[in-house]
Amino acid sequence: MTRELSYTWYPKDWTYSDSTFSLSLAERGAYRELIDLAMMSDNNIKPEWDVWLRKWNTSESEIVDIMAKLESKGLIQISDDKVFIPSVERRISSKRNGSKGGLKTAQSTANGTANDTPKEKEKEKEKVNIVPVYDDFFNYALSKKGNLNFSHDALRLKYDSWVENGWKDGNDKKIKNWKTKLLNSLPYLKERKQINRI
């Protein structure tokens, strides 16, 4: 028994897709059936008009109209011996190339960003936003303070609290961009006490 390719279904995409939105319920049902058939047949659907007529409980004229509508919208391609679904080809081709389901992950390019998947991009972001050493944290605050007057101790406490909290702020939210977070925090840090000199 061969293992069939499973696939993720996105109801929101299906519901609000421009290509399926204008379809009638019968047309949407037929298209959905064809997608399943494409996934089970390596996107090489052999037309079985008699079977489809019985299975879909429809007339020959109605199925001809449905197929014509789907083809006119570019959702299917019909030849004499095959029905092809362009939208599933990418996932099917990943199966042909050895993937066990889902889309095959793109290989990273030399700079590591051009073909990255969203998860890889997020990992790359995390590498960029690593926790800075305190000296970098302090020097950045010093360079951006403008006319703010914060104490070194208050800045150290802010840094230590974020580190001890797993690099999360006081609201337990992950700090994604520490520089922006620090700039927003500087006005609230305890001011350095002025020493009166005679």
Image (cartoon, grey):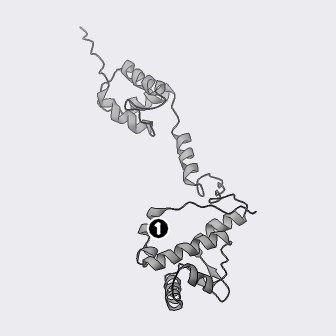
Furthest residue toward top: 198
153 vs 132: above or below: above
150 vs 55: above or below: above
Three-letter amino acid code at the position of disc 1: Trp
Residue at coordinates 58% horizontally, 72% vertically from top-left?
Answer: 35
- Residue 46 is situated, as x and y percent measured from the top left of the image, at 67, 81
Along the line of sight, the residue nearer the viewer: 142 or 89: 89
Question: Mark 1 = which residue?
Answer: 14
Q: What element carries label 1?
A: helix
Disc 1 crowd rating (10 Å Cα; few below 14, some 14-19, many 20+) is: some
- Residue 182 is situated, as x and y percent measured from the top left of the image, at 39, 33
Q: Is 139 displayed left or right of 30 in the figure?
A: left
Q: Is 192 displayed left or right of 105 in the figure?
A: left
Q: Quadrant of residue 107?
A: bottom right
- Residue 55 is situated, as x and y percent measured from the top left of the image, at 57, 79
Furthest residue toward bottom: 61
Image quarter hosting the C terminus: top left
Number of callouts in the render? Answer: 1
53 vs 91: above or below: below
Q: Is 29 displayed left or right of 1 in the figure?
A: left
Q: In which quarter of the image is residue 79?
A: bottom right
Along the line of sight, the residue nearer the viewer: 95 or 114: 95
Q: Quadrant of residue 101?
A: bottom right
Residue at coordinates 38% horizontally, 29% vertically from top-left?
Answer: 170
38 vs 99: above or below: below
Image quarter hosting the N terminus: bottom right
Along the line of sight, the residue nearer the viewer: 164 or 195: 164
Residue at coordinates 24% horizontally, 11% vertically from top-left?
Answer: 196
Along the line of sight, the residue nearer the viewer: 82 or 111: 82
- Residue 174 is situated, as x and y percent measured from the top left of the image, at 45, 36
